Image: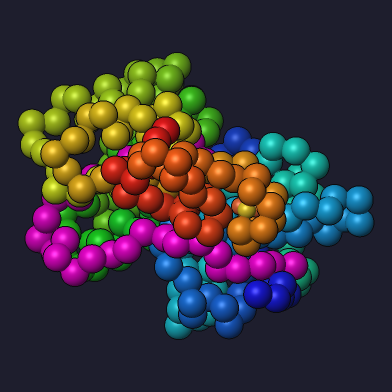
Amino acid sequence: MEAKKMAVIRQTEIADRVFELVLGGEDVLKMQPGQFLMIKPNRQDLLLRRPISIAAYDKERSECTLIYRVEGDGTRQMAQLEAGDSADVLGPLGNGFSVKEDLAGKQVLLVGGGIGVPPLYQLGKELHALGAAVTFVNGFSAKKDIFYEVEMAKFGEVHISTVDGTYGTQGFVTDITNQFDWSPDAVFSCGPRAMLQAVQTSFQEAEVYLSLEERMACGIGACYACVCKGNEAGKQFKVCQDGPVFNANEVKL
Ligand code: FES
């Protein structure tokens, strides 16, 4: 796959160090929820591309939205992109969430943690369009980190936890889901590993899909930086190529 230039349509800071970047280009037509792009920072000395998950896309307008948090030099540089610039992009990459038709009319639970929340937005939108009953449960550290609450509420019920209790339920996503008096038919989750483990343990009766946020270097299966263990003895997966979304039974967290 070749890298391409995508046009920067706009960029906005939507929470503390969290940016929403809208890009335009024909490859939007190929996108699925849960896939990611590898973006090359616009600075000669920053060689590695950064994996950024796709939060939303509009295929009619050929636009996609990425949401990321500034963590280091690469993402700090990306945060300076503005309308009229272009971004050097590889992707869409990886196997995303599949929106199965048999989820129409079913109860689906989408559990996100921090910067793992974005890919669940497009997924929730598509599941809602299919006729599934969507519930989002998003966990953040604090109120200043929260984004997309209003946007997600268009497609389902939204619950929020914060570790410091500055908004929503104090604690973790499981402090919310443990109170539910219903059981989801399917669960989709993306976020830190401890959260994914808690989700995997809490919903053993449901179909559970997890998006792993591994460290990535190449993003295309060439470097083995992102390997994770499978549940079968000796089985390994490359998160960038075999995932990032896996059936929870397949992987050992
Ligand atoms: Fe290089 Fe996955 S990031 S193999």
Residue beneath the point at 53% across and 59% down: 241
Magenta stretch: includes residue 103: yes
Compare residues 78 and 53 and report the one nearer the observer.
53
* Looking at the image, residue 201 lies above or below residue 34: above
Counting labels gives 0
User: Which percent across, then down, holds residue 192?
Assistant: 47, 33
Residue 204 visible at all: yes
The residue that appears at 45% across and 83% down in the rendered structure is 60
Quadrant for the N terminus in the image: bottom right
Name the outermost residue toward the right.
44
Drawn side of residue 202 relative to residue 222, left or right: left
Image location (x, y in percent) of residue 202: 22, 29
Task: Residue at 65%, 45% (x, y): give it.
Answer: 225
Q: Is residue 137 left or right of residue 237?
A: left
Across and down, in percent, residue 127 comes to: 25, 61
Image location (x, y in percent) of residue 209: 31, 48
* First to last magenta residue range: 88-115
Q: Residue at x 91, y 56 (%)?
A: 44
Q: Nearer the viewer, residue 224 or 199?
A: 224
Instruction: Write down the quadrant of residue 23 in the picture.
Output: bottom right
Quadrant of the rendering where the C terminus is positioned: top left
**Quick check: is 65 in the magenta stretch?**
no
Q: Is residue 96 left or right of residue 24?
A: left
Q: In the figure, residue 24 lies in which quadrant?
A: bottom right
